[in-house]
């Protein structure tokens, strides 16, 4: 799936929110954070900055972390400060998957209409395949069916149902490692 510029900007904004939370941590906790050394040093310096200098420093740290895996940072903050940032990130992932699927189904519906055919409920979706890699327990047939219905009718009920289906599969995936350990 190709990520749109808008989605890239949203992800950078999420990362910036993560950095803002990180720089609020006391130095002792910040030393324990899974950060590259340069980012850790810069985050420690932010405490003494105010106004524009603080914003610039946060943006620079964000830029440094773009190429780094951020899941360990979310987990670290979740353990220290609660789950709000992680919940927000997961919510945006589900939104992105739903929007990508809806856009693909609308495009497929237009193509089918142009060739005087009708989009079938079992149409082949590359987005559903990509989602299935991330969420193995998701009901692929139901996703393609609902996206087909949405493309035909533009009824928001189908879009909401896609969101619920994706969210349930994501929650199941998040609980899965815990279930195995018991």
Image (spheres, rainbow, N blue to C red):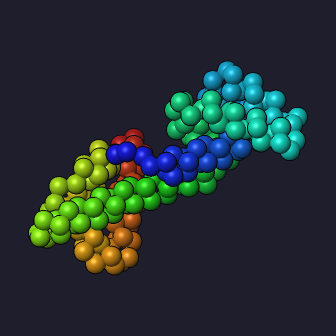
Q: Residue 83 in the image: state x and y as whole percent.
A: 59, 52
Task: Name the spot of residue 36 as percent of width and height, x first.
Answer: 63, 23
Q: Is residue 163 left or right of residue 30?
A: left
Residue under the point 65% across and 36% down: 62
Q: Can residue 28 be seen?
A: no
- Report the residue at 71% width, 27% height from top: 40
| In the image, residue 167 above or below residue 36 | below
Q: Viewed as shown, does residue 25 lie left or right of 123?
A: right
Residue 92, compared with residue 164, is above or below; it is above
Q: Nearer the viewer, residue 98 or 112?
A: 112
Residue 174: % across, % down: 42, 49
| Residue 59 visible in the displayed image | yes
Residue ID at (37%, 45%): 2
Could you tell whether 46 is left or right of 134 in the image? Answer: right
Q: How many numbered circles are shown?
A: 0
Residue at left offset 88%, top offset 34% = 48
């Amino acid at each position: 799936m190709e990520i749109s510029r808008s989605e890239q900007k949203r992800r950078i904004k999420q990362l910036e929110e993560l950095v803002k939370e990180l720089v609020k941590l006391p130095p002792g906790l910040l030393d324990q954070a899974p950060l590259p050394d340069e980012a850790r040093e810069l985050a420690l310096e932010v405490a003494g900055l105010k106004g524009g200098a603080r914003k610039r420093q946060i943006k620079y740290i964000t830029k440094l972390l773009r190429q780094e895996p951020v899941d360990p940072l979310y987990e670290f903050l979740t353990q220290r400060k609660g789950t709000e940032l992680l919940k927000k990130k997961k919510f945006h992932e589900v939104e992105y998957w739903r929007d990508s699927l809806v856009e693909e189904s609308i495009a497929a519906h237009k193509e089918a209409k142009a060739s005087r055919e009708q989009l079938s409920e079992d149409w082949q979706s590359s987005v559903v395949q990509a989602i299935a890699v991330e969420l193995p327990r998701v009901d692929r047939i139901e996703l393609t069916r609902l996206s087909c219905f949405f493309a035909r009718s533009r009824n928001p009920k189908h879009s909401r149902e896609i969101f619920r289906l994706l969210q349930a599969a994501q929650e199941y995936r998040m609980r899965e490692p815990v279930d195995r350990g018991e």
